[in-house]
Image (tube, grey):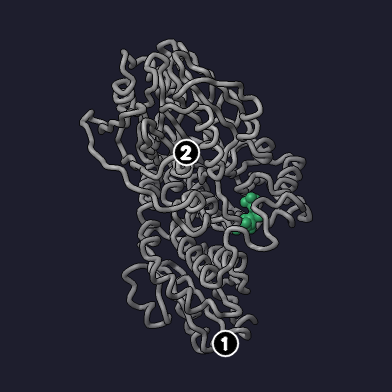
Amino acid sequence: MCGIIGYTGNRQARDVIISGLKRLEYRGYDSAGIVIGNGSIQLVKDKGGMANLESILPEMKGQYGIGHTRWATHGPPLKKNSHPHLDCKEEIALIHNGIIENNMALREELIQRGHKFKSDTDTEVIVHLLEELYHGNLEEAILKTVARLEGSYAIAAIHAKEKGKIVGARNISPLVVGIGKKENFLASDVPAILEYTDRMIYLLDEEIVTLLKDEVKIMDFQGKPVKRNWQKVEMNIEGAEKSGYEHFMLKEIFEQPDVIMDTFIGANLNTENGYSLNLKPDTIKIIACGTSYHAGYVGKYMFEEFAHVPTTVEIASEYRFSSITTSNPLIIGVSQSGETSDTLVALRIAKKRGLNTLGIVNIVGSTITREVDHVFYTRAGLEVGVAATKTYITQLIALLALAIKIGVAKETLGIDDARYLSNQLRKLPKHVRTILDGSEQIIQLAEEISKSKSMFFLGRNMNFPVALEGALKMKEISYIHAEGYPGGELKHGPLALVTKETPVIAIAVKDQTYEKMLGNIGEVSARGATVIGIGTEGDTELPKYADHVIYIPKVPPLFTPVLVSVVMQLLAYHVANVLGCEIDKPRHLAKSVTVE
Ligand code: AGP
């Protein structure tokens, strides 16, 4: 989720780049940097945001350059890790958004050939490769370089000897070209350059673009020229920051296929040695708050299924009052912000008790990551919406990956099974896209239940915490009271609240809980409730019980929480949208709760 911008034309590049980077602040940043070319490479970069960069920026004359705001995924937010990165001869400057999957292998290869690395980033391998492959033409060097890269990337580079030229390349991470009059622009997203031009060319995967102030050339990764006309952008800057979605929350729900893949890549499960992990806990205790607690609760089932490790889950603010356990659990703190006080305090207590701690966190360098013994980063990118969506989904992926790794380490999960599960994980983005494409049905159901005063979410086993999460999403953005309950518990009291006014969302996927959930649906239907069933595609039985059925693709049981949660997110979002709620900033709530 880094921000990229490049400019070449008659203006002072410094001003265009700085204003563009400030337009990309919604993508998040923990460091920023700029290079201006004028026969040499003028580089200024530092950790911290745009205000800090501007405060240290000298006069920089030159009509072409590149700039970057970093959202750290490899290496903490330090000056040395900020972009642009330079080659050893300091003639090439490069910026990058994405993840280079094979960066470790490339780094070793380049070090053996004498390259000196200055940063901990995956990005730096690209500029050293470029240096080796450069023989007087930057786009030719980029063409040879991308042939060595695996993973997701949007890159831009300039060479001191090629005045006025910027070369960019795209694979998975977005890159857009802005067409001006005697000037041209390159950016990771439209808002960075919309104030200068509304004529955009969206690069496709495996394309390279060469910009001069009066020429734009595109070629594919085989070097074949590509002809593409510009499109006029109709939206304003604010709309562009949301990529055209009405709210950041909806944009972030639709980013989930990509961030699932980024987190999967970051978990290294796609490499042979990816399963190696030197953690073999006898028991695990997961502590977290809110949505992260729900993710951790789903994780309990994953650790017990794949690693056969007895796992308990505790609300972080309750942990301090819990009696000291006899066993020596691995303590896993789950927190997207890495700053939640309740979780931070609980982890400190665990450390005081001499327990081994691991953090599953989204923000590199956040407080929790600096205090735990091990860190596992989700790679959701910046999440602007206060309601957690993509950060929660990537927490589930991280927990799945950890459970697989610990299962292999403890030999409770064979390598073949681990490989099978990893391959199934790799298919999840496609399945999530199927659900996102089916939003129309969810929008209609949202309209139907949006007038309710209260609703129930029911699930069993690993889908019970998913029911809790569905209820929380509904509460926090539509302000409708909602309760998540284990299906078997309703008859022990809450059933008294079920009437035809209380819709029930029942998770009845084809797993071991299916029959019992059909029974629960019968229970609440008999009291007049409208039931929305969430079921496995192809199930013809469920429609006989539920008034409406939203289907999810068939996946291994422990993967259903990911898909069911996306349905719940869309339902809550569309109910809140029908009601005209302030979805990205719900009343009384904060993105990171740093008070106890
Ligand atoms: C979830 O939508 C809420 N924003 C809230 O419950 C959140 O999950 C909780 O405060 C924990 O935050 P953390 O993941 O940053 O620790």
Number of on-image labels: 2
Which residue matches tag 1? 499
Please name the residue shown 42% across and 82% down the image: 547
Left or right? Give the position of 543 relative to 561. left
Q: Answer whether residue 391 is visible to the viewer in this image.
A: yes
x then y, percent, for residue 301: 53, 57
What residue occupies the far left of the structure in this picture? 224
Q: Is residue 286 visible?
A: no
Q: Place residue 474 in its image quadrant.
A: bottom right
The answer to whether 215 is drawn above or below residue 478 in the figure is above
Relative height, residue 399 to residue 550 (above, below): above
Mark number for residue 266?
Answer: 2
Location of residue 188 in the rendering, given as x and y in whole percent from the top left corner: 44, 39
**Depicted 580 relative to depicted 585: above or below:** below
Task: Specify whether 440 is left or right of 482.
Answer: left
Q: Could you say which quadrant of the image residue 455 lies in?
A: bottom right
Do the numbered discs 1 and 2 sit on residues whose CB atoms are within 8 Å? Answer: no
Picture disc at residue 292: none
**SS of the residue under disc 1:** loop
Percent position of residue 315, x then y: 68, 57
Q: Secondary structure at mark 2?
A: helix
Q: Amino acid at mark 1?
A: Thr
Disc 1 C-beta below 8 A from ligand 1: no
Q: Earlier in the sequence, mark 1 or mark 2?
A: 2
Give the side of residue 376 with respect to residue 194, left or right.
right
Closer to the camera, 509 or 257? 257
In percent of the image, x 45 and y 21: which residue is there? Answer: 93
Q: Is residue 184 left or right of residue 228?
A: right
